[in-house]
Amino acid sequence: DTEVTQTPKHLVMGMTNKKSLKCEQHMGHRAMYWYKQKAKKPPELMFVYSYEKLSINESVPSRFSPECPNSSLLNLHLHALQPEDSALYLCASSQERTGGSSSYEQYFGPGTRLTVT
Amino acid sequence: GQNIDQPTEMTATEGAIVQINCTYQTSGFNGLFWYQQHAGEAPTFLSYNVLDGLEEKGRFSSFLSRSKGYSYLLLKELQMKDSASYLCAVSSSSGGSYIPTFGRGTSLIVHP
C-alpha cells in the first residue's frame, strides 16, 4: 500500500464553523506533513510531525491546529477560518523526517479542496 | 533562506524532448527532488539527486551540478499526458529543518 488518503475531498465552511481534515497512511512512514497550496503556486509547508511529535510549525495561525493521534493518522482542525484560507490542503508522508545526512521522497495525498465562505 | 528558480511555462510537441531547468542558491545542500503535479491533483515523486550527475528513469532523467546550483529534468518521447506542472524541491540545512522547499513549478504544455 503506497497510498496516502485524505478526507474529505471537498469542504465548504463558514467562518464560524469548526471542521477537521483527515489524512491516513499505512506505509509505516514516521514523518507526516501538512501543506497549503494556492492555485498556480507551489505547496507551502505548514506542519511536520516526526514520530508522532510536532517538530515544525511554520508560524501557522492558531486557527489551524494539527493533531497526530497515532503513527498512521494526521488531522488538521480548523476553526474561525478566513476566506483567504481557501486552498488545496495536502497531506504527505515520508519514511523519516529529512535530516542532515539523508533525504526521503514524500508521498502526497490527493488533497482537500477547502472553500471558506 | 533558499532561492529556487524555474521557468514559469514551457511548451513542446508530442514525441519531442524537453528540458526543464532549476537553479538554486542555498547553504548546506542536502538533495534535490523533482515532482510532477497534474492540475487539481497531488504531486508525485519523479526523481532525487544528491550527487553530481545524471539519473535516468525510463523517459525521465534528472541532472545535478552542485557547484553550479543547477538541475534539469529531461523528458523524452513526450506524451500528451506529460502536460503538468513540474516542481523542483531543494533540501538544505538553511533554516535548520532540511525539509524540501518547493520552487514555483514549471507548467509544461504538450501539444500534438
Image (cartoon, coloured by chain):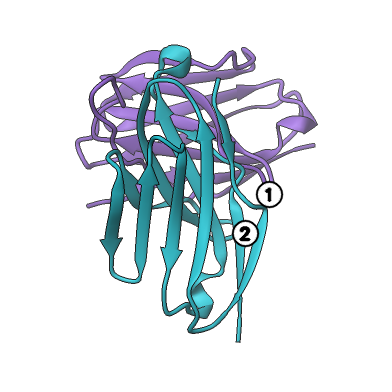
Q: Is residue A20 visible?
A: yes
**Badge 2: residue crowd in 10 Å (few <14, some 14–19, many ≥20):** many
| Residue placed most toward the observer, A75 or A54 | A54
Residue positioned 52% across, 58% down in the render: B20
Left or right of A47: which side holds A49? left
Residue positioned 38% across, 23% down in the render: B98
The purple-coloured chain is labelled: A
Residue positioned 44% across, 57% down in the render: B73
Quadrant holding the C terminus of chain B: bottom right
Q: Indicate the quadrant where residue A72 lies.
A: top left
Check the image and report above or below for A34 versus A87. above
Identify the secondary structure beneath mark 1: loop
Q: Indicate the quadrant where residue A15 lies.
A: top right
Chain to which the residue tagged by mark 1 belongs: A
C-alpha separation, residue under disc 1 versus residue under disc 2: 9 Å
Left or right of A79: which side holds A14? right
Q: Measured from the top left, where is residue A108 in percent x and y?
A: 41, 45
What's the mark number on residue A40? 1
Q: Is residue A8 visible?
A: no
Q: Measured from the top left, where is residue A102 in percent x and y?
A: 24, 29
The residue type indicated by label 1 comes to Lys
Q: Measured from the top left, where is residue B105 in percent x and y?
A: 59, 49
The residue type indicated by label 2 comes to Ser
Residue identifier under label 2: B107
Q: Residue furthest front?
A: B67
Tag 1 near tag 2, CB within 8 Å:
yes
